[in-house]
Amino acid sequence: MPAYPRSLVAVVSLVGAAAMLVPTAADATGPVGRPRDMVYVANRDSGNVSVIDARTNSLKKTIPTGADAIGVAVDRGRHRVYVTNAGANDVSVISTKKNKVIDTIPVGNRPVNVAVDERFDRAYVSNRQSNTISVIDTQINEVVNTIPVGASPGQVEVDFRTHRVYVSSTDAQEVTVISGFTEEVLTTIPVQRPFGLGVNPLKHRLYVATTGANRVSVIDTKTNQIIDTIGVGAGPANVAVDIRKNRVYVPNNLSNDVSVINGNSNTVTATIPVGTNPTGVAVDDTRRRVYVTNTGSNNVSVIDTKSKEVVATIPVGTAPIGVGTTG
């Protein structure tokens, strides 16, 4: 494997999950916020999650989770956040009503990412050292299935229309396609060293960040074929899709910027400077904001999607990676 910085090696664990929360009561840190007002950030080296109030761009609470907190997925239906703890081989379940951990689920070795299919009551966890996907029943918060995939699985994404699950396996140089109906592998798509994933269910597109080549591969999810490649910055780490605007945001871990792609033309329309080693990314299309975790500078950049400029920088824990917004 190429000698990428540790922050870049960890990007295979990212996820930009979005969900809606319910109002919560005030706690020791003050009012937590209303529905669609929260951003959750997993801090790897701190082993905790920072909760950001999107209205004020301020840190509202820090929730202890487990060693090497990396991946984040928000379940709006059950008012929960799932956080993978790669160093503890488990997943923390956070109640968004109380903003505290309510359950811990043992999974495989070095879980790095998680994605939720709310309609199917499932959470899918990629276990990087086990080369498996743990399937969690979110009704009971227990693992009900384990699916073998390619070597070094990283990011997981769910297409909410087709209920297909996509897994990037970096060392196998492929993306695995899993049926959410049968929980079986349907096919694999060859991709050079895939890292981050982002899906647009409305356009039948899957975007794959290929770090070694500094590009994003565009896959037609109807045919499972690569139909285009887009050059981006150095070390593309992750992908988030604004479904309404059909825009794709790619944090480039080594060039310290974010590439903005027009999903209609598959061209880069802007490059936005952010912090050091940007890694995770999530879109809040309600507030027209994009949140980018800067693993090297321990903060989060907030981008206005209209002006394409950074409008706030929020300090968080040490080595932030995964991020999920409720908008």
Image (cartoon, rainbow, N blue to C red):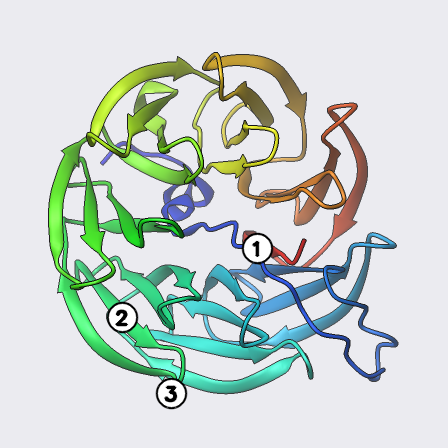
Give the residue type at disc 2: Val
- Asked if the residue at tag 3 contacts the one at tag 1, i.e. Cβ–Cβ closer than 8 Å, the answer is no
What percent of the width, then of the height, locates residue 49? 61, 67
* Foreground residue among 214 and 143: 143
Tag of residue 135: 2
* Label 1 residue SS: loop
- Which residue does the numbered mark 1 point to in the structure image? 18
* Foreground residue among 256 and 192: 192
What percent of the width, then of the height, locates residue 112? 36, 59
* Foreground residue among 262 and 66: 262
Sequence-wise first label, 3 or 2: 2
* Label 2 residue SS: strand
Please determine whether, in this image, residue 106 is positioned above or below residue 272. below
Q: Is residue 184 left or right of residue 156?
A: left
Instruction: Tell me the CA gap for discs 1 and 3.
Output: 21 Å
Q: Residues within 10 Å of mark 1 (few under 14, many from 20)?
A: many
- Picture quadrant where residue 107 is located: bottom left
Q: Residue at x 84, y 84 (%)?
A: 28
Q: Residues within 10 Å of mark 2 (few under 14, many from 20)?
A: many
Instruction: Tell me the CA gap for discs 2 and 1.
Output: 19 Å
Q: Residue at x 53, y 20 (%)?
A: 261
Tag of residue 140: 3
Please determine whether, in this image, residue 128 is positioned above or below residue 35. above
- Asked if the residue at tag 2 contacts the one at tag 3, i.e. Cβ–Cβ closer than 8 Å, the answer is no
Give the residue type at disc 3: Ile
